[in-house]
Amino acid sequence: MEIRSYRRDITVNLEHAGKRLDIFLSENHPELSRNIFQQLIASKKVFVNGRNVNKSHILSAGDKIEFEVTMQPEVSPAAQDLPIKIAYQDQYMAILSKPAGMVVHPAASYQNGTLVNAILYHLKDINFVSGEKRPGIVHRLDKDTSGLLVVGKSECATSKLIEMMKAREVTKIYAALVRGHVEPMQGEVNRSIGRSPRNRLRMAVLADGREAKTRYEVAARFDRYDLLKIRIESGRTHQIRVHMSYMGHPVVGDGVYGGIDENTRRFGLCRQFLHSCFIGFKHPFTGKQITVWDDLSPELVDFLCKACAYEARDIRAVFCE
């Protein structure tokens, strides 16, 4: 990939007065994403009237904007025919079901076998001008969490979907089997989450962490476990797993936060019992209401049958009773 440089000197006209700096730049230079412009602004590589300002700076007519960006060559992830289910797609986006064990995007220790590798193979019309290493990634699931994820097919679509996530305009529902019986049977955990000071591989409830809210409802109760319907209003790393462990009811099968017991060993559950089963939102381009359900992964159904004598293949029916 060749190195591409962009240098621009722009004068804001009356039509664009009153707009935020990052929005103005992304609208007038669609070849670069809003995220890229926000990074440039944070790195003090964008000047308004000769000085650095923040991304939310409101522009006035006659303001002079200067910026330069160099797109460095990068190794693009390889397209790979990996097993994912496409639950919904149109020209703007897709909603995919990720299996447990698959990392979302490439990293130093995961160059292949990721969701990004699968996206590049299965979504032939995906188009990213800036050569993003994580094309279309709007939000993440942990490696050993299965279920639904939204993917944008262009920089514009991805940026809009990320903004909707931040504005809490996307409903996400998870199915989680937890140890013990949760009381009350319906409620919320509103505790900030941050990196654990004792173990940097774990997250923890911390007073100075980032705001996180998890709503739960008991959908089915068994001898040792509760099956929970969970909604999250934020997207912190390990959020559900941390909040459930904090309540004293870790997610079954979660070896990091206390969810291993004799049943997980006996019946061979090698992952946390956590599945993203529903995503719903208003389409940012067409206005259509999008609602997608995804049933539990086979290994989760198998564990419910063996450990709880319960079969819940149709999770939508269980959660909508």
Image (cartoon, grey):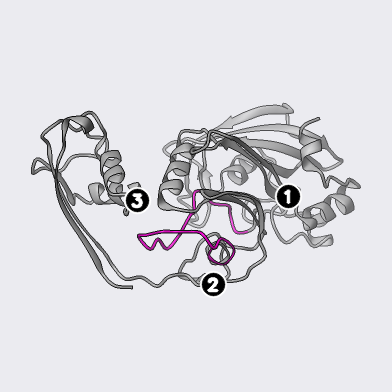
Examine the rendered structure and indicate whether residue 201 appears above or below residue 42. Answer: below
Answer with mark 3 or mark 1, whichever residue precedes in sequence: 3
Query: Which residue in the protein does label 3 denote?
Result: 33
In the picture, measured across the screen, residue 270 lies left or right of residue 80, that is right
Query: Which residue in the protein does label 1 denote?
Result: 252
In the picture, measured across the screen, residue 162 lies left or right of residue 37, that is right
Element carrying mark 3: loop
Q: CA distance from mark 2 to mark 3?
A: 25 Å
**What secondary structure characterizes most of the magenta part?**
loop
Element carrying mark 2: loop
Element carrying mark 1: loop
92 or 199, which lies in front?
Answer: 92
Report the quarter where the C terminus lies.
Answer: top right
Residue range of the region highlighted in magenta in the rendering = 120-143
The three-letter amino acid code for the residue at tag 1 is Val
Residue 43, x across and y down, in percent? 23, 51
* Label 3 crowd (10 A; few <14 / some 14-19 / many >=20): many
Answer with mark 2 or mark 3, whichever residue precedes in sequence: 3
Instruction: Mark yes or no: residue 65 visible.
Output: yes
State yes or no: residue 233 in magenta: no
Q: CA distance from mark 3 to mark 1?
A: 40 Å
Location of residue 68 by image quarter: bottom left
Q: Residue at x 57, y 35 (%)?
A: 281
State yes or no: residue 136 in magenta: yes
Query: Which residue in the protein does label 2 denote?
Result: 112
